[in-house]
Amino acid sequence: MIVVKFTDSSSKIHQILCYSHFFASSLDFYLRVDDENIQICYGYPVSTSVYSSNLLVGTEISIKALIYRYILYILSLCNFSGEFLPIASRKFPLYQGKDDSRVLYISGLALQLAKSDHQTTMDIASEITSGLSAMGGGVFKVETIPPGWIHLELTDRFLAAWLQNLVVTSLGGCGEMEKGKITLLKPSSLFMIQYAHARCYSLVRLADHEGLIKLKEPHQPNLTSLVAVENIPWLNHEEKLRFTHPAEGRLISKLVEAVDCLESSGTHNWGKVALDLSQAFEAFWCRCRIWGEVKIASPQLAQGRVGLIMATQSVLRCLLVDKLGVFAPVEL
């Protein structure tokens, strides 16, 4: 174990910036700096000039787990007198916001720390926010909201890289059923989930057949190994996500939520997680077209929507096979 001790007179922000490499090595993060490319790895490299940024990422694909790591490191630099053990074990409030137009996480950590610290709740929240802003500028925007809530909104560039990573990386231990945690579902609910998975599969195959995207292995039954030869154009020329329809935002929100659940050690209602994602996909598919006029007038938007379908298929398959213990059909 490496212990780094800072003097009380040192600037907290200066400490954070100067010891970013210590942060990277001690928490299994790595810092990738490249003027033309970004490596959003989670164990798998993704390169594209569109997503150029300096980001810290970890081995998890879960955004919630990534934010936990940022917060834990910031706390290790701060001199709070509150109990650190429950915080170190990630037992502090952090939940995803309900606004589907953005991916927002909200933490009540400052409210918890203020119960046993001499500082005010807002002072604690401001100190944590300052550290997070300095460390995670490429990942999220941070804001303090009275009486001490910390809001972390994911940047579009990071979400684009996260989505790209999601379509090229197998989730969890897909293919191995989670023993002892099989959820019983109504036949109608299970059918809806399996139908959504099969629909995603057929749509991606169709997109490949019509040349909208090109897959490396278009005939493999496991789409988690099917990767577009070129990166999905998630961002527009202003480096903003192309998705503006509420159904697109809802689907992204449910993808983030499902992956957070998949990567956590807690107990979840997997049937509900899978059903929520499949319903979000159905709403997306009913309202957001890919072929016809959209493909002709906005081919990059069409490709981005196919990317969302690929991500959805990957997550649904993991939920069906790993968590629900059932077959993930490619046709019904």
Image (cartoon, rainbow, N blue to C red):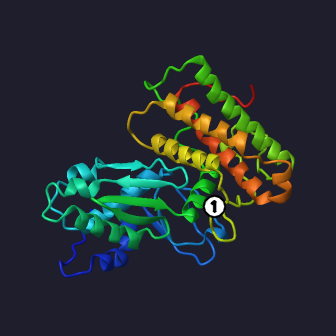
Q: What residue appears at the point 64 percent right and 27 percent down from the top-left corner?
A: 192
Q: Is residue 23 left or right of residue 176?
A: left
Residue farthest toward the top in the current orientation of the protein: 187
Q: What residue appears at the point 56 percent right and 31 percent down from the top-left corner?
A: 275
Label 1: few (<14), some (14–19) or many (≥20) C-alpha neighbours in 10 Å: some
Where residue 260 appears, as percent x and y from the top left, is 47, 45
Q: Is residue 164 left or right of residue 229?
A: left
The quarter of the picture where residue 101 lies is bottom right
Foreground pick, 94 / 44: 94
Q: What residue appears at the point 42 percent right and 52 percent down from the top-left corner?
A: 65
The secondary element bearing badge 1 is classed as loop
Where residue 258 appears, as percent x and y from the top left, is 51, 41
Q: Quadrant of the N terminus?
A: bottom left
In the rendered image, the vertical position of residue 240 relative to residue 186, given as above or below: below
Amino acid type shown at disc 1 = Leu
Q: Is residue 147 left or right of residue 22?
A: left
Q: Is residue 208 left or right of residue 305?
A: right
Where residue 31 appears, as percent x and y from the top left, is 47, 69
In the rendered image, the vertical position of residue 146 relative to residue 62, given as above or below: below
The answer, for residue 16, to whether it is visible in the render is yes
Q: Quadrant of the C terminus?
A: top right
Q: What residue appears at the point 62 percent right and 62 percent down from the top-left corner?
A: 46
Foreground pick, 125 / 78: 125
What residue is shown with label 1?
Answer: 241
In the rendered image, the vertical position of residue 116 relative to residue 179, given as above or below: below
The answer, for residue 313, to whether it is visible in the render is no
Q: How many marks?
A: 1
